[in-house]
Amino acid sequence: MKVKALTLALLLASTVGYAQQQTANRYQQYLPIIEKGTLAQKDSLAKALVTEVKTYKTEADYRTTINILRSLGKEEEMTSLENSAKKKYPKGTITRDAFITNVFYNAETSTAKEKAYTELIKKWPVKNFSEEPLTYDYVLGSLAVSFANEGNAQKAVHYLSEMKERFWRGNGYIPVGQALLQAGDTTTAAPLLKTAMDDSYYYLTLPEEQKDNKARFAAMGYASSMSAYVNILVAQKKYAEALGYIENALKAAPEQADGLAMVYYKSLLGTGRKLEAYNILTRLYAKGQFAIEKDLKKLYTELNGSAQGYENFNASLKTELTQNIRNHIKDMATFKPAPNFELFNLKGEKISLASLKGKVVVLDFWATWCQPCVRSFPGMKAAQESYANDKDVQFLFMNTWERDKNYKENVVSFLAKNNYPFEVLYDDQKDPQTGEVMAAKYGVKGIPAKFVIDKEGNIRYFLTGSSPNVDYIKLEMKELIEAAKKPYKG
């Protein structure tokens, strides 16, 4: 949680006030050039903005222009303007945010982070920025997690208690609670996870007219916080209590049933409701969660008196899953020439799409800070390994939209830490005409974004989003790749 945490915090904090700030209109005014402009238009806009800086009367003017320059990819001009703003407003938000990014988030130990936090609140007191507590909550959450990972539960809980925004509280409480659980400190973890769960439930059950963006965001965390807390109850064999929470949750948020399925199954089984538990396992298995097969077979045998017929039953579930995937990928189908690229890999070698003609190519646009991207990687690794002996299939992981200057080192470290044998290309070569990177040429609006390109160089499938389900991703990629191997029929 370094630059990405601060960036998202600022984005959420500023989103609330955008409609009320005239400065936001300036950003919207230039959005067409930011998104669709040529390189010449972007250069011209950047030059004009730098020229008008001398007329600025508030820090907000500087901040808006900095954001525009960042969106235009004008790093040099942006850095110069940031430095000017920091000199003019040493106690302002731009200087403060630079300190948080460069000093606090780069601190490597809890002690160093705590020292940086003490300096932060001394130089930029919370009371001076009462309209944006989220920035400080991010810092507090990061500090608490750091102490929790080092086993200092007392300090972790202390800094969590300093957080101001209830809607955001779960984002600090959950990772701290999980870290403490891994360390075996259930006593401290349980009340933190319950608080996160209760907060999410509060926002989830608000009347619809009272649900703003903050409430909706907090409500999204209900399944994860619920699962974390109820898993403690299940581990303590408090199955009835766990069921009470879960079934209450399913009434309030039936759309979160999948996120609660595993802990629901365990609770049902613990209370002897085997048939209901079996039905949940069947649904999970039919969605590609094959890791539960041992439990499914055991319940099948208990409920039927023997394992006779299980293999046929199992095969029917897999057939159903395959057909569902085939129906699903129809919505991802497209047919258009894939933009060519020449990008460098980790070794500094230039790789082009043209050189891969005759192969089915899978492109996965991702970034180290993108949690949905990272969440899908175990599945993508399994998919790649299943085609290890197929010379007609190539997976390429397109690292894009990185925010840190040392992104190349971060990528190498990330891959090594997680043992991902991926062929990574750095999507950092800007088009001389438009100033865009390759992700923009492919029409990527959000990551992860995956493209399956056939042997003739045509995009056959485009999909976004991710899943943590390894088996499902493996099956889905197989269907996409095998379909792309076949001639296009229109």
Image: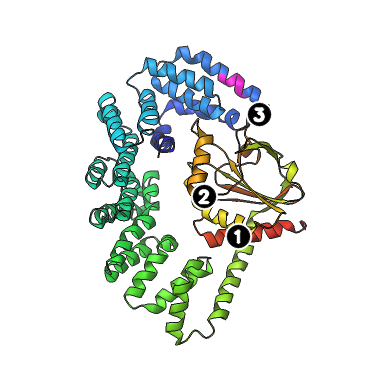
Q: Quadrant of residue 163?
A: top left
Q: Position of residue 13 (x, y in %)?
A: 38, 36
CB under 8 Å between callouts 2 and 1? Answer: no
- Around disc 1, counting alpha carbons within 10 Å, would you say few (fewer than 14), some (14 to 19), or many (20 or more)? many
Left or right of residue 105: residue 320: right
Lateral position of residue 363 relative to residue 279, left or right: right
Q: Which residues are magenta?
A: 42-46
Residue at position x 71%, y 44% in the image: 338
The first of marks 1 and 3 along the sequence is 3
Q: Residue at position x 50%, y 30% from top?
A: 405
Could you tell me the amino acid type at mark 2? Answer: Asn
Spatial CA distance of label 2 from label 3 is 36 Å
Mark 2 vs mark 3, foreground winner is 2
Residue 26 versus residue 293 in the image, above or below: above
Q: Which mark is residue 434?
A: 3
Check whether the beta carbons of the residues at disc 2 and disc 3 lie within 8 A of each other: no
Q: Is residue 296 above or below residue 330?
A: below
Residue 402 can be seen in this image: no
Kindly report the distance in space between the C-alpha atoms of the residues bearing marks 2 and 1. 22 Å
Which residue carries the number 1 mark?
Answer: 476
Q: Quadrant of the N terminus?
A: top left
